[in-house]
Structures are given as structure tokens and as C-alpha cells.
Amino acid sequence: MNLREIKYILAVADARHFGRAAENCFVSQPTLSGQIKKLEEELGVVLFERTNRSVEITPIGQTILHHARLLHEQVEAIERVARAHQDPLDGPLRIGAIPTLSPYLVPLLLVPLKRQYPQLRLVLSEELTESLLARLQRHDLDAALLATPVDQPELAQAPLFEEPFWLAHPRNHPLYFKDEISAQDLTEIELLLLAEGHCLTHQVMEVCHLRERPHQGEMADLRAASLETLLQLVGAGFGCTLVPALAIRGAWMTDSGIIARPLELPDAFRRISLVYRRSFPRPQALAAFASVLLARLPNTVRRLADPEAPLAGT
């Protein structure tokens, strides 16, 4: 068994397809298939059940792949430690962010990060929380910007800032004539929410003291996949929603038929943290990224960390 074969079986396990796995490994399919067949003969077990339509992992394959993934991660860790010893601020930094944060935060820091740390190459991924945590566990990401706390001992989280929620409602909505939005108002509005899987949905429901999604009215069957789509529905008069403060800098604020109002409520915010593995060998790179991010935040959010020491977390 060698590291190349380990890489091949992991590629097949992830892709569940020999052709796509071969493409991802930059080899021909016969080469990859032959190496895996050779490994199976060497081990005396079948790792994959092959059919014309699918590739399934056998029970013994699941066990072996678990160990193979751990081995592959350790090899990558050795390579990262070696690179970090040379210059921790040189090379790629793989950061994930949730979709309701990434489009509004990332443009603020790309240019200053490149200017201050030209050798640091930011590789960004935008996915839902569950997917980002899974990729962080697999070492596919180095850190992730999340709005929900994590309870995994191998992960650390550094709180960076609190982002208040603003109320977005159509221009002709009755709330337009109210000077201040109360908690009671939030329980009575026609509330639009993102599709299931977005942590923002649960946070908005908590602010509005809802135990379940609205199931009556025009908005009951509306499930927007993105915040931008949700805001278009608000602009079209289908209801109201809560938006994170950074999103009020978006293009939708101009001539969209939407009024954005700050909420003077103590629990109307979400906390954004940088989550990373405690074993990550380049904490200097994460600190550099976080310091630039904190320095570029607008005054619509509340900083929780010092740009000079941004990784003081749990």
C-alpha cells in the first residue's frame, strides 16, 4: 500500500464514480481502477461494489476508508507543518463562509488582505453550516466563518463580531408609519424565511419568538434559497424579513421598494465566529485574516475581538 493508492480510494469514496475520481486525480480511469484493484487483491477484501450505475462502499471498505482518511490527513499535516515552518503567511488559506455572510463581508477584505499579505492566497468557499463543518473536519478547509456555536472539542471558535438584525419591509407596509419596531410587532408581521438548512432561518425565528415556520398566509409556501431572492420577495410586497446588518450595504437598498429599519431589541443579533481546528499548524495566517477582517468592519456591527489579538476564543 502506498500514498497514491490511498489518494485514489478516497477520491472514489468522495465521488462515488470511477471516472470523476480519475479526473480529480489527473489520471486515466484504467490507471485508477487498476491501482484500486491491485490494492484490493493485496488486502484480500473488496472496498467498492461496482455496478453500471453506481459505486457503493462495502462495510469493510467503510472501516478501511476511515483509517485511510486519517492517514491522508496526517500526510497533509506534515506538509503543512513544513510549509508553515518556512513562512506561515505564504500559501493558500482555505476559508469557508455561510451564504448569508460571504457576499457582504468578503468584498470588504479581499483587497486589503492582498495588500497587507501578498503571499497569502485566500481560497473561499460558500456553503451551509453543516457542510462547512464537515469539510473542516475532513481538513478540506482551514477555518470557517459561522453564525452558530460549535460543540466539538477538536474545534476552536474565536468570536469576531455581533451583527444586528434589521427589519426589511415593503415601502407601503403599515410598519412604515411606526417610529420604533417592538418585539410584539415582530410576532405579528408576515414573516418570510429562507429555505431549511440556513442557520439564519432559525436565528430569525428565535428573534421573533417563533417555535415553527409560518404555515398560513401568502408566504407559507415561499422558500427562498438565498437572501437576495428573499429580499426581492419583500420588495414585491409578499411580506417582511430580518436581514443581517452587513447585508444593508447591498444593491437591493437602492430603489428596491424595501425599507430597512434597525431593531432596538437586546437579542436581535447574531454572533459571527472564526471556527478552526485546534491542531491547525498556521495560526499566524488565521490571525492575519481575522485582523484584516476586523479592521474593515463597518460601524453597523459590534466588534468582539481586538484586531491585534483576534484569535482569543474557546
Image (tube, grey):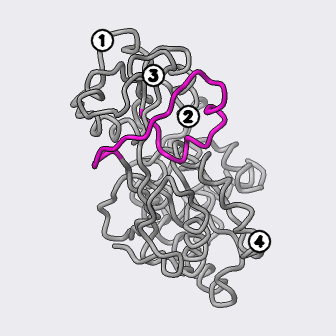
- The alpha-carbon separation of the residues under discs 2 and 3 comes to 32 Å
- The image shows a total of numbered marks equal to 4
For the residue labelled by badge 3, is the local secondary structure a helix, a strand or a loop?
A: loop
- Mark 3 vs 1, N-terminal side: 1
Q: Nearer the viewer, mark 3 or mark 1?
A: 1
Q: Residue at x 49, y 52 (%)?
A: 132
- Mark 3 vs 4, N-terminal side: 4
Q: Residue at x 61, y 52 (%)?
A: 125
For the residue labelled by badge 4, is the local secondary structure a helix, a strand or a loop?
A: helix
Q: Which residue is mark 1?
A: 216
Q: Residue at x 77, y 71 (%)?
A: 115
Specify the quadrant that holds the C terminus. Answer: bottom left
- The alpha-carbon separation of the residues under discs 3 and 4 comes to 40 Å
170 over 88 or under it: above or below: above
| Amino acid type of the residue that numbered disc 1 sits on in the rendered structure | Gln
45 over 101 or under it: above or below: below
For the residue labelled by badge 1, is the local secondary structure a helix, a strand or a loop?
A: loop
Magenta extent: 242-268
Q: Which residue is mark 3?
A: 223
| Amino acid type of the residue that numbered disc 3 sits on in the rendered structure | Arg
| Amino acid type of the residue that numbered disc 2 sits on in the rendered structure | Ser
Q: Assess whether residue 113 is covered by the magenta stretch.
A: no
Q: Nearer the viewer, mark 3 or mark 4?
A: 4
Q: Nearer the viewer, mark 2 or mark 1?
A: 1
